[in-house]
Amino acid sequence: MAADECAEPDHPGAVAPPPAPPGGARLAWQCRRGMLELDLILQDFLDRHYATAGDAEQRAFESMLKYPDALLLEFIMGHMEPSDPIVARVVARLRGPC
């Protein structure tokens, strides 16, 4: 049996996933946190907004992935506000529907 015979046929109306951002696998791994809620919020931003975010917002998001879970949660829940205005803009996008 040829390899082509095992491939699934194209399905009409199927929607292709958005292209992965550069370094997407690394960023997706960094979105994995100790809290499921943070996993979902961060991964959603990566999937839906990262590719269209400006360079400064992309860098801010990447730096936020190095923050401790507790700090990220405080920002997202609105208990604390980031002092960096670009990070604050990313947090605002994480908080609400865009």
Image (cartoon, grey):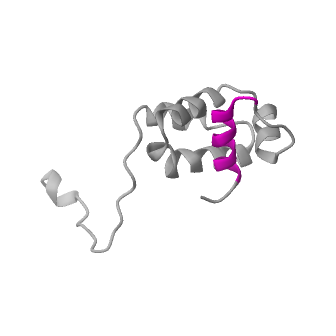
Confirm whether the magenta stretch covers residue 89.
Answer: yes
Q: Which residues are magenta?
A: 83-95
| In this picture, residue 12 sits left or right of residue 97 | left
Name of the residue lying farthest toward the bottom: 12
Q: Position of residue 73 (x, y in %)?
A: 79, 40
| In this picture, residue 56 sits left or right of residue 1 | right
Front residue of 59/30: it is 59
Confirm whether the magenta stretch covers residue 42.
Answer: no
Q: Position of residue 9 (x, y in %)?
A: 23, 66
Quadrant (top left, top right, bottom left, bottom right) of the N terminus: bottom left
Quadrant (top left, top right, bottom left, bottom right) of the C terminus: bottom right
Front residue of 4/84: it is 84
Name of the residue lying farthest toward the front: 85
Quick check: 20 above or below 14? above
Front residue of 32/49: it is 49
Going 63% across and 41% down the picture, which residue do you hit?
90
Going 71% across and 27% down the picture, which residue do you hit?
67
Q: Main secondary structure of the magenta part?
A: helix
Q: Position of residue 34 (x, y in %)?
A: 74, 36
Quick check: 68 above or below 33? above
Name of the residue lying farthest toward the left: 2
Name of the residue lying farthest toward the right: 79
Q: Position of residue 11 (x, y in %)?
A: 28, 71
Number of dots carrying numbers: 0
Going 45% across and 36% down the picture, which residue do you hit?
24
Quick check: 95 above or below 71? below
Q: Which corner quadrant of the image does residue 96 belong to?
A: bottom right
